[in-house]
Amino acid sequence: MTGPLTCENVHDMLSAYNDGELSDEEMRAVGEHLSSCVACGAESTRIANLKRLMKYWEGIEPSPSFREKVVERTKREIEGRRIIRVSKAVLAVIAVILLAAGAFFLGRHLKQRAEAESAKDRPAATSPQPDRRPRSE
Amino acid sequence: MAAKEEGRRRRRQEAARPAADSDEALMARVAADSHSAFETLVRRYEAPLVTFCYAFIRDRDAAEDLAQETFLRVFRNASRYRPVARFSTWLYRIAANLCINEVKKGRLRKTLSLDEAVGPDPDGTKIIERLAASGDAPLTEAERREASALLDRAIRHLPDDQRTTLVMVEYHGMPYQEIAEIMGVTVSAIKMRIKRARENLREALKILGAER
Ligand SMILES: [Zn+2]
């Protein structure tokens, strides 16, 4: 900041001054101006009074059921999450069982086929019966 | 009454609160699925949050709905919250976005003019005179209620950005920097808004008969 403040400068800063929102240097400069300028001093008092009056605005008190509604909704969400978590766990177990069963049956099937293949490769004379028949010997 | 006190005392309370009880510590517990931590936050912020939404929307029921939605989002996104920003800034930013969208939808937009006001309020004049004369002497309960209602009418007529800024400064006691972060604008924009808000509030009070 250079030079002394004009009344116009101060007028623009009075709102922030009353909120304590100017830099230290500005706060000091405006304070000095106010101590010697009646017009700006009066304007600053008006703003201070307006601030004092605003303290009487009570805002909005939430209705008595407000918190209850919020809590109820979030509790329901937690319950939902728990159900999802449990279902996921159950699904995972089912998936593991299915995979294991699948692997078992696939393994058995492949083994049977391999045995059947090797039976076919043997000389036909020794084994007249068709491939598919279960071997009973 | 409790709402106002709650709003005003917020900053001092924050300083006095033990670290384990801070908003940020509670949020960490909410992220770990603690519902009681969430309830503490709701109790702490319900009145200031509903009032915050009311400043945007000027309708009590809509303000409660938006505040409820805000809390729900806080709860759902708790694990995404990082304490780099104050919890309150994060909370109010969520609320501001919801409110601004709601206002944009235009459903609740009422164009209010001072003509709609009930007209000059002779009791309002008395209150201002009394405030000026009595210094810090407390108002009677009836006068308090009168003053609050008068201010409510005057505030409702301010342009949106001025009204919301005024409420954040005077009711919530927020520093300009935090308001700027919540609204996504510069601190100098906030300075301008609060200055204009006060000029217009004074005009509105004059029309309502409370200030000369
Ligand atoms: Zn001056």
Image (tube, coloured by chain):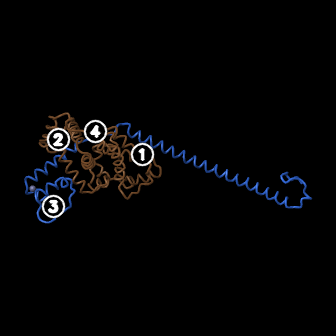
Chain colours: A blue, B brown
Picture disc at residue B205: 2
Point out residue A20 in the picture as x, y percentages from the top left corner: 21, 55
> Could you tell me if the residues under marks 1 and 4 are in contact, i.e. CB atoms within 8 Å?
no
Q: Residue furthest right?
A: A125
| Residue on which the image places disc 3 | A28
Find numbered disc 1 in the image and state the secondary structure of the residue it sits on: helix
Find numbered disc 4 in the image and state the secondary structure of the residue it sits on: loop
Of badges 1 and 4, the one in the foreground is 4
Mark 4 lies within 8 Å of ligand 1 (Cβ measured)? no
Three-letter code for the amino acid on which mark 2 is drawn: Leu
> Foreground residue, B26 or B185?
B185
Marks 4 and 2 on same chain: yes
Check the residue under mark 1 and report the chain it is in.
B
Picture disc at residue B150: none
Above or below, B31 against B152 in this view is: below
Marks 3 and 2 on same chain: no
| Residue on which the image places disc 4 | B110
Three-letter code for the amino acid on which mark 1 is drawn: Leu
Check the residue under mark 3 and report the chain it is in.
A
Disc with the residue nearer the chain's start (1 vs 2): 1
Mark 1 lies within 8 Å of ligand 1 (Cβ measured)? no
